[in-house]
Image (cartoon, rainbow, N blue to C red):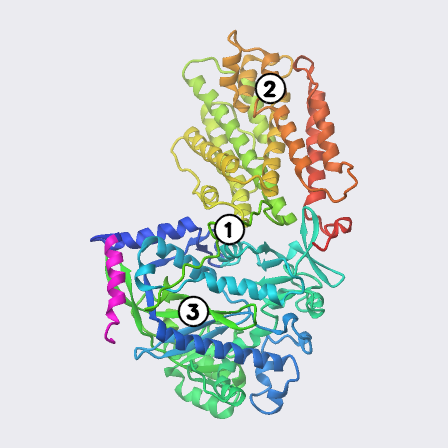
Amino acid sequence: MRAGAAAPWLAVLEELSAVAGDDLGHARERVQRHAIDIGTGFRIIGEDSERPWPVSPVPLLIEAQEWARIERGIVQRADLFETILADLYGPSTLAERGYFPATLVTGSPFFLRPLVGLAPPGGHHLHFVAIDLGRSPSGEWRVLADHLRAPTGAGYALENRLAVSRTLGGLQARLNVRRHAPFFAAFREGLAAACQRSDPRIGLLTPGRYNPSYPEQAHLARYLGLLLVEGDDLAALEDRLYVRTIAGLKRVDALWRRLDPRLLDPLAFDSHSRIGVPGLIDVWAQGNVVLANAPGAGVLESPAFGAFLPQLSTRLTGADLILPNIATWWCGQPREAGHVAGEFESMLLSPAFGARTLGLPGEAPVAGADLTPEQRAAFLDDLTRRPQDYVGQEVVRLSTMPVIIEDRLEPRPFTLRVFAARDAHGNWQVLPGGFARIGEHPDPRAAVLGEGTWSADVCVHGAEPVSPVSLLPAPDSLHIRRNPGTLPSRVADNFFWLGRYLERGEALLAGIRVMLGHSIDADTGAAPDEATIAKLVAEIVDSGAAPAPGGFRRADLIAFARIAMEARDGWQSVAAINTHAQRIAGGSRDRLSVDMVRLLDAPFPTHRGMLDRAGSLQRRYAAIAGLSAEHMGRTAAWRFHDLGRRIERARAITRAARIFGMSGASAGDLSTLLDLADSQISYRQRYLTGIARVPVVDLTVLDPGNPRALAFQVERIREHLAALPVLDDDGMAEPQQIEATELHALVAPAQAALLDPETLSEIEHRLFRLSEAIARRYFLQGAEPLRASGLTLA
């Protein structure tokens, strides 16, 4: 270790000691809690739920002088890739001159032939790259892999920095750690500079919530101020790209895509793609949308190309690679194939072009020494038939960094992912640090480490003080913005139905609690109102939550309540409704608070008693309602969320009034109606002479001051629709506004004594029509959503 190299690590240990005391495990738990608070997570393919992102509290330290060499190597490599891509999709002279075999291009599934001859808007194929590095025990950095198609991980690097900074608060100043914000600001400015318009609209194109790194994408979109969009949100029209919003079509100038390029446009590439944008490549070819990165860049990711990069660097730039590749032999050449066949037990074996082969057990690299005898025979057999499908690489041994295992520090091997992005001048900027992946076991082979078990912040430190740059506005900034930005129709749809599902679940829970309360009263000697219970059970059955019970004994009702609470096999139970809400919230991570997502994702209660379980869930729903009421800004997204709640609550109270509040209702019916409307206390405070039908109906249906009453919901619905955007400027009401006005005209003058089942049925019907009108106007509707009347270039 160089003189003075130990001092930074002593600073790390001192900061850890201040946090953890005698228990290093406490520091690990604390940084993990911070990561969860930030909302960091990831998904394993095939799993429904997210996992927390594993962060180590011990950062990897890299001295500024050492980092400067890494920076130069990354910039050199990115420039080399840009030069090669410009030739592959342009004049194609490199293969013609024999710089590399043409098979490297034609054999790759990531070479997109329809793009040949098309110049990318802005003049660059690459805007953002990621490169994996390994450091040998001797200290030499070498390239393990390149990521050019849709590089992931920059958001995790940012989240690691936030979590570790909150845990080791003094480390930034003590070590002069270089900040991440300037890099992200430069990338955002670089994308904007490549666009045609001076004030461009930039989106982050995501495959959706089931993508493993969707939480990272949502975090990046929120941090950078980008519009998080899916393919269904976008439409190509007359060589322009638009996002479908509640205010009509809005022009999109650039997309930072995280979608496989082959799925981008079913008209240009894979016709089976259902998550792309038909016509997107035509817009790109006309220079009207920037794609970062340009489709087709993934052809250079293949391990086979890595075998030719050193000589390409020498021939094209006159210099050797500053960051050398690991030694690679492409078996498409006879001599190299023979070398691999003879030495494969000491090599790392990989598919040459990233696609699965017959001779290896999977798509990931595998150490030849780890193959079973049967797998070795299969590999050698297929290597003879299709040698061009394989590469052999040296097995890299990695240096280690400290990580907390239980309550002690232990060495573990790591790899480093580094990111580079173009700035407004087209120059490459390198993120100072990136993030490290840490192996679970001490085995130093890079192939064994794989994706790693833990991640770590990477701190580039030096003697020079670092300016406190941030993407947040300066405290004395005079720029004020109250417009929250564009709201895509899909997001509005999600928020509307999130509100409806939450309200529907709460209403079902209220019915279950009232039903179980009646059954408990029966066992304590009070006369049960079996007719009321039968009506309540019938209402739950009609909602699709459970099949009809065998009887009305307490055991029957408890079994019935269990199905209505927990059933998953086609029933619209509380658990099923909760799952719908969780899925919607999972796809709205960029617009919902971490607390709301956490409440929605909380495990289903497992209390012993069904009544306690229902009460626990209802209190959770109340907490979510409180968060939306008191913590969500009054944006259009909130209005759609509240619209969903109001329509669902209006529907529920209207049905309840028709079933339990009409002429001939018993005292049990009226008490149930008050319970379902959560208005028992209000009624008792207002009426001291006992329960009566007309006052109960007035309070639960027609009182505009009761937040649970129908009249209150109708007034809020009308207010929301009046505040939402319209497509035409002629001052005329749109269909959804007309429906709300007619509904208000039906409810406002009504009198409780005269309210009858027919009127309530008409109100239910109008609520359904109103919901349909809102969906037709604001949400995606198959081939209709272009809404040309609302076309705008804004």
Q: Nearer the viewer, residue 226 or 405?
A: 226
- Residue 523, percent across and down? 42, 18
Q: Can residue 692 be seen from the camera position used here?
A: yes
Residue annotated with mark 1: 477
Among all residues in the image, which is located at the extreme left? Answer: 22
| Secondary structure predominantly adopted by residues drawn in magenta | helix
Q: Quadrant of the N terminus?
A: bottom left
**At 29% from the left edge and 69% from the top edge, which residue is drawn?**
442
- At label 1, counting other C-alpha atoms closer than 10 Å, the crowd grade (few under 14, some 14-19, many 20 or more) is few
Q: Is residue 36 magenta?
A: no
Out of 742 and 253, give the one closest to the viewer.
Answer: 253
User: Around disc 2, counting alpha carbons within 10 Å, would you say few (fewer than 14), some (14 to 19), or many (20 or more)?
Assistant: many
Could one spot residue 353 in this view of the protein?
Answer: no
Asked whether, in this view, residue 211 is left or right of residue 781, the answer is left
Q: Amino acid at mark 2?
A: Phe
| Image vertical order of residue 269 relative to residue 790, above or below | below
Which portion, as a residue range, is magenta? 1-18
Question: Which residue is under mark 3?
Answer: 417
The residue labelled by disc 2 is 660
| Residue at left offset 65%, top offset 70% | 121
Dot label at residue 375: none
Q: Earlier in the sequence, mark 2 or mark 1?
A: 1
Q: Say what amino acid the circle numbered 1 marks.
A: Ser
477 or 310, which lies in front?
Answer: 477
Type of amino acid under label 3 = Arg
> From this viewpoint, which residue is outermost toward the top?
689
- Badge 3 crowding class, 10 Å Cα cut-off, few under 14, some 14 to 19, many 20 or more, is many
